[in-house]
Image: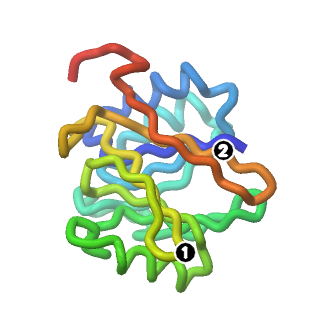
Amino acid sequence: MKILVVSDTHGQGIRIYKILRLIGKDTDALIHLGDVVDDLAMVREAFPNLPIYDVCGNCDWGSHEPKERLLSFEGAKIFMTHGHRYKVDHSLDRLAYAAEEFGAHFCLYGHTHIPFYGSVGAVTIMNPGSLSVPRGGSNASYGILNITDGVIDAKIVDYERIFREDL
């Protein structure tokens, strides 16, 4: 199973569309980690059969999307949230603890606009970065999860290297 993970698109839904046009045939689901979930409207229209899972971020005012979700794919449990409620700007400890409380050993978050892939205790954590406003010296980026028999192989992809466009 292959899952596209994006976050902090802030009005650049066209970039999600471009990624899916490139890898869409091989993509089984899309996860959006908030800011701005309205960017998914075009994607939902263009890819009506693609399962999409999203959470609201701190810029998704008035959104009725959940603040966090627990997903299960092929036996792998994934906790997803935007991250601002867990103060991810300062530490990932609260986030890792929440994932453990939900029984997940893999966690996805956004908010900081800075790509991250690593572990905190027994929890593997990934932030795919931002597709529109990268920070911390990073380029625009997204994540890919490949899940086989409950094992998650994750990577962060540099959007600019793939699409060669100016932000």
Q: Is residue 38 left or right of residue 102?
A: left
| Amino acid carrying mark 1 in the image | Ala
Q: Quadrant of residue 76?
A: bottom right
Report, in whole angstroms, how far the alpha carbon at label 1 lies from the one at label 2: 19 Å
Q: Quadrant of residue 12?
A: top left
Task: Residue at the far bottom: name it.
Answer: 101
Q: Quadrant of residue 63?
A: bottom left
Q: Which mark is residue 122?
A: 1
Q: Are marks 1 and 2 in contact (CB under 8 Å)?
A: no
Q: Is residue 16 left or right of residue 151?
A: left
The residue beneath circle 2 is 146
Residue 104 rendering spot, x and y as whole percentages:
59, 73
**Residue occupying the point 45% across, 49% down:** 32
**Residue occupying the point 21% across, 23% down:** 167
Residue 110 rendering spot, x and y as whole percentages:
34, 56
Residue 142 rendering spot, x and y as whole percentages:
42, 39
Q: Is residue 135 left or right of residue 57?
A: left
**Residue occupying the point 43% across, 44% down:** 6
Q: Secondary structure at mark 1?
A: loop
